[in-house]
Amino acid sequence: MDLTHPELPWRTSSHSSAQGQNCVQVASIAAGVAVRDSKNPDGGKLVFTASEWSSFVAAVKDGTFDR
């Protein structure tokens, strides 16, 4: 899986701030969802299966996600 492909549709989170903090980008990929720090796009990336991503989003929405 090439997460550096220039046409990968990275989207910036609506919760990212213009001040350069909390800058998260996500991209839909065949395996699920990739996540990266928009301040360091060439750095590490996390990959979640569709099921893992759905569980994470649901936990954030209902307030049960524990960092």
Image (tube, grey):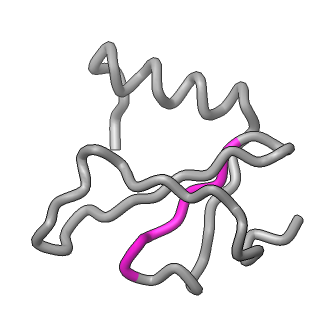
- Magenta residues span 33-39
- Residue 49, by quadrant, is top right
Q: Where does residue 47 sit, x and y in percent of width and height?
A: 69, 54
List x then y, in percent, for residue 23: 31, 64
Identity of the residue drawn at 52% across and 79% down: 41
What residue is drawn where x is 77% and y is 74%? 5
Q: Is residue 39 left or right of residue 40?
A: left
Q: Is residue 35 above or below residue 58?
A: below
Residue found 35% across the figure and 27% down from its top: 60
Of residues 39 and 55, the one nearer the viewer is: 39
Q: Does residue 1 sit above or below 65 in this rendering?
A: below
Q: How many marks?
A: 0
- Prevailing secondary structure of the magenta residues: strand
- Please check the rendered image and state whether residue 52 is part of the magenta-colored stretch, yes or no: no
Residue 1 in picture, x, y percent from top left: 89, 65
* Quadrant of the rendered image containing residue 52: top right
Image x and y of residue 17, in percent: 17, 60
Q: Is residue 12 left or right of residue 36?
A: left
Q: Is residue 56 left or right of residue 32?
A: left
